[in-house]
């Protein structure tokens, strides 16, 4: 196991102190062409996760450590939680996003279909795709939700394999935090979650990870980011634990939605991505103002 920092990223003895520490976290994420590293996205994602979740998920005091295999260790009173992070974005989309940041291609372009196992494009091939800006076949009906669900499941299955390798440290439980940068238009979260839970690999995923959180990362693979005053949606998909005092019947599964972020998700422009001169991952309002109350996620059963 390798610790990535000399000390813990943060420690907190109560919710107010946690909120203050999160507000001071360095969550700026550089452009891909300006030296973005995995640690930038990891710290951004874990900050949003801890700011969004209710304190019911743990008992204070807590300590957050940035490390490897898994990426974070959240020490709480009576329980140690490993948190594995993954950014889900087609590698060719990430490659082309960097080239667009360098000034290649039109300011407005079509969203292309992606695949986790697609062959890597050379720079010359990627530049040609950018210049051609071929819309392809597009999406029909619920194909965006089905494509998204398959991509999330494949990425999670890859992390199941990582967690099973020698040297991966086990804790009281392990969570999976997925940063969703998958390029699909008009992705309905409820429908997507239903298709994701129906994927054949989900039983193994939920056996490995006690909780699975999916963070809407519009702007990860493309250049379209949410307005800086709104929060990205964080969804929990699984059938473990509880939310406050909400009842759950046997066999029900839970998806937890941050509704302000969900509204922003539905406002995305279908089929288009706009490039920006400078992309910074947005900091939600409840992190910008120390002492402001935190928004609770709304549980939705299905």
Image (tube, rainbow, N blue to C red):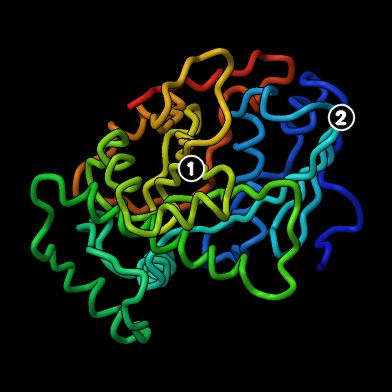
Please give the residue where the numbered disc 2 appears in the rendered image. 61
253 or 131: nearer the viewer: 253
Instruction: Check the image and report above or below for 100 versus 217.
Output: below
Per the model, the C-alpha gap separating discs 2 and 1 is 25 Å
Task: Tell me, for residue 131, which label it has, or none.
Answer: none
Q: Residue at x 65, y 26 (%)?
A: 288
Q: Which corner quadrant holds the C terminus?
A: top left
Query: Dot 1 corresponds to which residue?
Result: 215
Query: How many numbered callouts?
Result: 2
Report the residue at 82% width, 67% height from top: 2
Q: Check contact, mark 2 vs mark 1: CB within 8 A.
A: no
Q: Position of residue 38 (x, y in %)?
A: 62, 63
Looking at the picture, tell me which residue is in the foreground, 155 or 187: 155
Q: Is residue 231 left or right of residue 262?
A: right
- Camera-side residue of 153 and 107: 153
Residue 214 falls left or right of residue 74: left
User: Residue furthest toward the front?
Assistant: 250
Q: Position of residue 165 (x, y in %)?
A: 64, 74
Q: Quadrant of residue 100?
A: bottom left
| Secondary structure of residue under mark 2 | loop
Q: Element under label 1?
A: strand
Residue 63 image position (x, y, % from top left): 84, 40
Disc 1 residue crowd, few under 14, some 14–19, many 20+, Cα 10 Å: many
* Residue at the (69%, 59%) spot, across then down: 70
Query: Badge 2: few (under 14), some or many (20 or more) residues near its Cα, within 10 Å?
Result: some
Question: In the image, 227: left or right of 74?
Answer: left
Going from N to C along the chain, the mark reached first, 2 or 1, is: 2
Q: Does residue 69 appear left or right of residue 99 in this picture?
A: right
């Amino acid at each position: 196991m390798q610790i990535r920092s000399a000390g813990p990223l943060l420690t907190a003895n109560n919710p107010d102190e946690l909120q203050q520490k999160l507000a001071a976290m360095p969550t700026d994420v550089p452009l891909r062409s300006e030296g973005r590293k995995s640690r930038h996205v990891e710290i951004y994602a874990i900050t949003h996760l801890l700011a969004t979740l209710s304190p019911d998920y743990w008992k204070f005091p807590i300590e957050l450590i940035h490390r490897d295999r898994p990426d974070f260790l959240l020490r709480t009173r009576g329980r140690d939680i490993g948190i594995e992070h993954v950014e889900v974005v087609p590698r060719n989309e990430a490659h082309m996003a960097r080239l667009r940041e360098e000034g290649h291609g039109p300011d407005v372009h079509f969203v292309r279909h992606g695949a986790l196992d697609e062959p890597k494009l050379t720079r010359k091939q990627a530049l040609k795709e950018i210049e051609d800006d071929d819309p392809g076949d597009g999406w029909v009906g619920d194909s965006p939700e089905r494509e998204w669900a398959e991509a999330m499941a494949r990425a999670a299955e890859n992390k199941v394999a990582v967690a099973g390798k020698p040297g991966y440290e086990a804790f009281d439980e392990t969570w999976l935090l997925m940063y969703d940068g998958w390029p699909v238009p008009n992705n309905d979260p409820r429908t997507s979650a239903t298709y994701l839970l129906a994927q054949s690999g989900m039983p193994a995923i939920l056996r490995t990870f006690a909780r699975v959180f999916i963070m809407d990362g519009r702007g990860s693979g493309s250049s379209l980011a949410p307005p800086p005053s709104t929060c990205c949606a964080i969804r929990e998909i699984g059938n473990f634990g509880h939310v406050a005092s909400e009842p759950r019947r046997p066999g029900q599964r839970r998806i937890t939605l941050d509704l302000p972020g969900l509204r922003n998700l539905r406002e995305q422009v279908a089929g288009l991505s706009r490039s920006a001169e400078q992309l910074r991952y947005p900091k939600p309002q409840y992190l910008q103002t120390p002492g402001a109350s935190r928004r609770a996620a709304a549980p939705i059963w299905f």
